């Protein structure tokens, strides 16, 4: 990427505004196998990522690579139908670029989703994990180098919004499916981990491991966004009972569990719409 990220963001926003002039309130990042939610959006515009200046284009399976603008539960939203990953050769700055563009479009809340491997013994394939925290094991950071904010040192003591976490868990209970509150370990990939690595990640406090989300969340926090992140547990990673997996298995399990994730996102957006309609004191 060029040194002046601010100019890159401005060019991307201008190109999007040429197609869609609505200010979105919520940005959604759809991960592996989770792209069906876009069909719930009353879409006003779909723009291919490669048609937006400087916007990275996904190459991973099931990531369609388009930006969808419209409304969901009456809330103006913009959704990334597919994301890019570090393992595709993109830098942390490029991986987080879409989130920065969303913030520049006016987004106040980011909802990120992903597929992950569960390391907590209580987790089962198809379960949802609501991220309470993360461990950055990518050895990279989107804040390194020139960026568009004045302050590079960002507080990450609570990257995930506590109120949104509680709402997400309550929605899962109301819909009678399992949702855990846990810690996500972000790695580069694209390989799955060794037994020793799973043991290490579990011992340092990880409940699940995946290859995305962390760079996006760091950038979102720097941009001042509230953040909710949701994982679908697609396989369990118990070192003493480790079974082989592959990308297609991950996609299939994520897709089968997608209605759970959709229920949480729709519930969160309905609550956001209700909050926005309530009269403000004074």
Image (cartoon, helix red, strand yellow):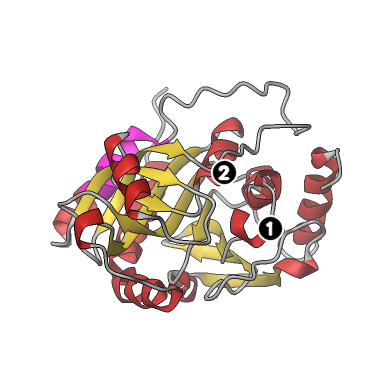
Q: Position of residue 175 (x, y in %)?
A: 17, 62
Residue 156 appears in view: yes
In the drawing, what numbered circle is on residue 215?
2
Q: Is residue 27 above or below residue 136?
A: below
Mark 2: secondary structure: helix
> Marks 1 and 2, how far apart in space?
14 Å
Front-lying residue, 112 or 142: 142
Q: Magenta stretch containing residue 38, yes or no?
A: no
The chief SS type of the magenta part is: helix
Q: Position of residue 4 (x, y in %)?
A: 85, 38
Q: Magenta stretch containing residue 165, yes or no?
A: yes
Q: Position of residue 144 (x, y in %)?
A: 69, 32
Q: Residue drawn at (22%, 53%), measured in percent from left and top?
A: 179
Task: Name the residue that disc number 1 marks.
Answer: 89
User: Splitting the image into 4 quarters, where does residue 43 fall?
Assistant: bottom right
The 10 Å Cα crowd at callout 1, few under 14, some 14 to 19, many 20 or more, is few
User: Splitting the image into 4 quarters, where does residue 141 fall?
Assistant: top right
Q: Is residue 126 above or below residue 101?
A: below
Q: Quadrant of the C terminus?
A: top left
Marked residue nearer the N-terminal end (1 or 2): 1
In the drawing, what numbered circle is on residue 21?
none
The 10 Å Cα crowd at callout 2, few under 14, some 14 to 19, many 20 or more, is many
Q: Residue drawn at (25%, 67%), measured in percent from left and top?
A: 126
* Magenta stretch, residue numbers: 160-169
Front-lying residue, 61 or 137: 137
Q: Residue drawn at (41%, 61%), measured in percent from left and top?
A: 73
Locate residue 87 relative to residue 62 in the image: left or right. Answer: right
Q: Position of residue 173 (x, y in %)?
A: 15, 54
Foreground mark, 1 or 2, reads 1
Mark 1: secondary structure: loop
Locate residue 261 relative to residue 20 in the image: left or right. Answer: left
Q: Is residue 176 above or below residue 166?
A: below
């Amino acid at each position: 990427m060029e040194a002046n990220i601010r100019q890159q963001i401005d060019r991307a926003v201008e190109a999007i505004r040429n197609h869609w002039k609505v200010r979105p309130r919520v940005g959604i990042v759809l991960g592996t196998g989770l792209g069906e939610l876009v069909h719930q959006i009353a879409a006003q515009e779909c723009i291919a990522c490669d048609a937006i200046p400087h916007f990275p284009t996904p190459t991973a399976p099931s990531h369609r690579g388009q930006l969808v603008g419209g409304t969901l539960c009456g809330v103006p939203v913009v959704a990334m139908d597919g994301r890019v990953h570090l393992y595709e050769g993109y830098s942390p700055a490029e991986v987080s670029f879409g989130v920065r563009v969303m913030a520049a479009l006016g987004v106040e809340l980011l909802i990120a989703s992903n597929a992950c491997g569960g390391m907590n013994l209580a987790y089962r394939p198809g379960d949802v994990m609501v991220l309470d925290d993360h461990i950055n094991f990518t050895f990279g950071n989107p804040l390194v180098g020139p960026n568009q904010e004045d302050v590079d040192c960002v507080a990450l003591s609570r990257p995930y919004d506590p109120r949104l976490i509680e709402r997400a868990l309550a929605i899962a209970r109301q819909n009678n499916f399992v949702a855990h509150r846990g810690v996500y370990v972000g790695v580069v990939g694209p390989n799955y981990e060794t037994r020793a690595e799973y043991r290490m990640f579990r011992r340092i406090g990880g409940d699940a491991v995946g290859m995305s989300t962390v760079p996006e969340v760091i950038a979102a926090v720097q941009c001042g966004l509230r953040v909710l992140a949701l994982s679908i547990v697609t396989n369990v990673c118990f070192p003493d009972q480790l079974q082989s997996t592959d990308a297609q298995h991950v996609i299939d399990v994520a897709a089968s569990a997608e209605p759970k994730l959709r229920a949480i996102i729709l519930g969160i957006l309905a609550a956001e719409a209700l909050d926005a309609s309530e009269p403000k004191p004074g």
